[in-house]
Image (tube, rainbow, N blue to C red):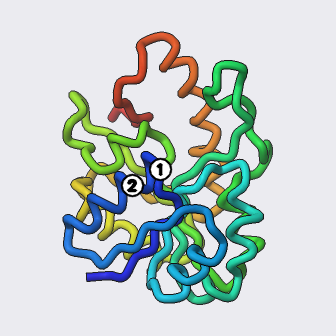
Amino acid sequence: MTTIAVLGNGRVGGNLATALTRAGHEVTAVGRTPGAAASAARTARIVINATPGAGALDRLAALREELRGKILIDVSNATVDGPDGLPGDLIHPGSSLAEQLQEALPGTHVVKTLNTMLFPVMTAPAALAQAPDAFLSGDDAQAKQTVRELLVDLGWREEWITDLGGIRTARATEAAILFVPHVIRSSGFAPFAISIAR
């Protein structure tokens, strides 16, 4: 059992909090209220950023002391909304939210994952017709191993999890969000994930 704070209690955060609680972890899910986020982060071993990516950097940088020594799992994508409310351009082109977070939080182990799929797939990967991929990006090997174990708790098979390397690789997976609005406009809001055919 691990103590986990999920920052963001919308569809993504709520879905993750429910599934991780079901898997036996001690989970606290909070909204974007600074006081509640700080309190939850202070007492957790692992913190999950499930807040909207556009404001996540400022929001989490303000928790620098609370996040020191913790694993921060970043599942968000920082984009500007398009005219129909779907993701548009990247906020950090040539970089990534995860890289910006790691730079702002040098005492925290940032791991990027679960950001290349619609939120239902995060906790039910086996529901898809084909095997999906979950990618890991981060500079600390032990932190990535801990996150890998959490993904297995969420139903991800070991062979579906790919370690891409350091945090800089997150710019590749974050850019995959640019597929999402086109896929949704083409085929509707049905669960899907970006995966590598082998």
Horizontal side, residue 66 vs residue 120: left or right: right
| Residue shown at the point (35%, 73%) measured from the top left | 27
| Residue shown at the point (68%, 46%) measured from the top left | 78
User: Which part of the image, by quadrant, shows the N terminus?
Assistant: bottom left
Horizontal side, residue 16 vs residue 178: left or right: left
Q: Quadrant of residue 4 in the image?
A: bottom left
**Mark 1 and 2 residues: CB-CB less than 8 Å, in contact?**
yes
Determine which of the numbered discs, if any, sits on residue 14 in the image.
Answer: 2
How far apart in space, not on screen, are marks 1 and 2 (Cα)? 6 Å
Q: Residues within 10 Å of mark 1 (few under 14, many from 20)?
A: some
Q: Position of residue 24 (x, y in %)?
A: 20, 74
Viewer-closest of 30 and 175: 30
Viewer-closest of 139 and 66: 66
Q: Position of residue 107 (x, y in %)?
A: 67, 85
Q: Is the residue 52 above or below the residue 72 in the image?
A: above
| Residue shown at the point (48%, 88%) measured from the top left | 43
Residue 150, can we see it?
yes
Q: Quadrant of residue 14 in the image?
A: bottom left
Query: Tag 2: residue type?
Result: Gly
Horizontal side, residue 146 vs residue 36: left or right: left
* Residue corresponding to mark 1: 10
Q: Position of residue 111 (x, y in %)?
A: 53, 66
User: Which part of the image, by quadrant, shows the C terminus?
Assistant: top left
Query: Tag 1: residue type?
Result: Gly
